[in-house]
Image: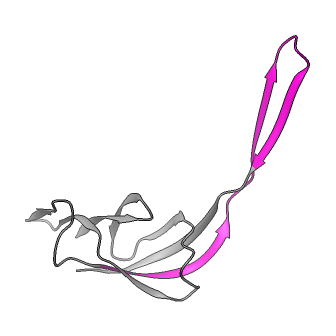
Amino acid sequence: MFAIIEIAGHQHKVAQGDILEIEKLKDYEDGDKVVADAVLLKSDDKKVEIGTPYLEDSKVEFKVLEGGRGEKIRIFKKKPKKRFERTQGHRQSYTKIEILSVK
C-alpha cells in the first residue's frame, strides 16, 4: 500500500517504513509523532482512491527522526571580459522522517 501526501507544499509518494528527507519542518522536535491528513491518493494492490483534492478519511502517521543540513552547494557566476566574478554558497535545511502507517 502506498499514498501520495502533501507536506510543506511538496508532494511525496510514501509507504509504511519509508524514510524521507523533506524540507525543514519548524513546528516539530525530534521524536514527535505527526499525522498528515493531506492525502491526495491512496492505493493498495486492488483499489485506487483519488481525492478531490484530498481524501476525507485517509491519514498518514510519521515520526520526526532528526533535523539537519545538506551539503554545501557553491554557485559561481562570471561574465567574461567584464571583471565580474561572484561566489555564493547555500546549505538546505531538512527534516528526516519515518512513515509509521498509511490509513
Identified at 41% across, 84% down, the residue is 34
Vertical comparison of 77 with 32: above or below: above
Helix, strand or loop for the magenta stretch, by majority: strand
Depth check: give the residue in front, 30 or 85: 85
Question: In the image as oriented, which residue stretches furthest toward the left?
Answer: 46
Query: Based on the displayed image, in which of its 4 quarters is residue 45 positioned?
Result: bottom left
Q: Position of residue 71 (x, y in %)?
A: 71, 56
Question: Which region is colored magenta?
Answer: 60-89
Question: In the image as oriented, which residue stretches furthest toward the right?
Answer: 83
Is 24 placed left or right of 103 in the picture? right
Depth check: give the residue in front, 54 or 43: 54
Depth check: give the residue in front, 62 or 27: 27
Vertical comparison of 24 with 59: above or below: above
Identified at 53% across, 65% down, the residue is 21
Is 90 placed left or right of 16 in the picture? right
Q: Is residue 71 magenta?
A: yes
Identified at 12% across, 62% down, the residue is 48
Q: Position of residue 57 (x, y in %)?
A: 16, 79
Is 75 placed left or right of 85 in the picture? left
Quarter holding the N terminus? bottom left
Q: Is residue 12 magenta?
A: no
Query: Based on the displayed image, in which of its 4 quarters is residue 38 positioned?
Result: bottom left
Q: Position of residue 82 (x, y in %)?
A: 88, 14
Q: Position of residue 10 (x, y in %)?
A: 41, 57
Quarter holding the C terminus? bottom left
